[in-house]
Amino acid sequence: MNNLFPNVDWAQMWASTGETLYMTAIAVLATFIIGLFLGLALFLTGKGNLWENKFFNFVIAAIVNIFRSIPFIILIILLIPLTLFLVGSMLGANAALPALIIGAAPFYARMVEIALREVDKGVIEAAKSMGSSNSQIIFKVLIPESLPALISGITVTSIALVGYTAMAGVVGAGGLGNLAFLEGFQRTQNDVTFVATVIILIIVFIIQLIGDNVTRTIDKR
């Protein structure tokens, strides 16, 4: 291995891999929770739904659309004051988390809204006719019925987050992106960049495999 990749410091490579996995895992968990909440709010306040409210639907949709549209590298810069306030530094894996979560949660929220729209209206009406409360309809009908699509959505979002961590690494957030940029690109050590890229691809393939298997398992259609 040392002959094939003479410039690769494997201890540093595995440490950077750990940072990428850490950033991705925390960001995915937070994105799932926040995105699910936002997506439910978007759907439920929409026309003809349980909490129909034009004003709140407009406000939530505007927030989601704004943050979903900002390129991630610009979002990192815009969030520097918030990151410094929350973390105290712009360097390291924790410093990337605010931008990762704020960048990905609105994206996932739209996927949640789309998944909820696909739920058969007849199932919802049947639950209403049996006297189900709004909370029962949400947690026993809407979320279970849309769960395969929700899992597919968070799988896609997780893969996007791996790419975001690489971009965050370019501005000092650590991880494989940081290693590929500082040790690979800036020092013209192409083997470092190559190995970091291969590891990122492996992480993406594993996430996709897990997501596909979980979706197939819970999809009863």
Image (cartoon, rainbow, N blue to C red):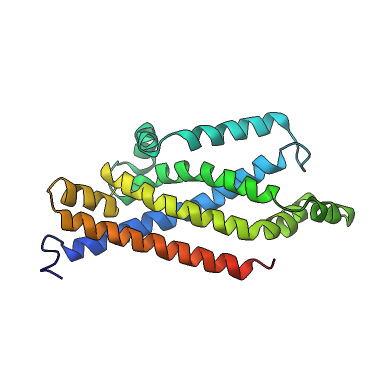
| Percent position of residue 199, x then y | 30, 62
What quarter of the picture does the N terminus occupy?
bottom left
Which quarter of the picture shows residue 109?
A: top right
What quarter of the picture does the C terminus occupy?
bottom right
Q: How many marks?
A: 0
| Percent position of residue 188, x then y | 12, 49
Question: From this viewpoint, is residue 211 visible?
Answer: yes
| Percent position of residue 137, x then y | 77, 54
Question: From this viewpoint, is residue 172 visible?
Answer: no
Which quarter of the picture shows residue 141?
A: bottom right
124 left or right, relative to 22: right
**Going 53% across and 41% down the picture, which residue do you hit?**
106
59 left or right, relative to 22: right
**Going 36% across and 59% down the picture, which residue do you hit?**
21
**Going 19% across and 65% down the picture, which residue do you hit?**
11
Whether residue 94 is situated above or below residue 195 in the rendered picture: above
| Percent position of residue 161, x then y | 42, 50
Relative to the observer, which residue lies in front, 201 or 102?
201
Whether residue 165 is situated above or below residue 14 in the rendered picture: above
187 left or right, relative to 85: left
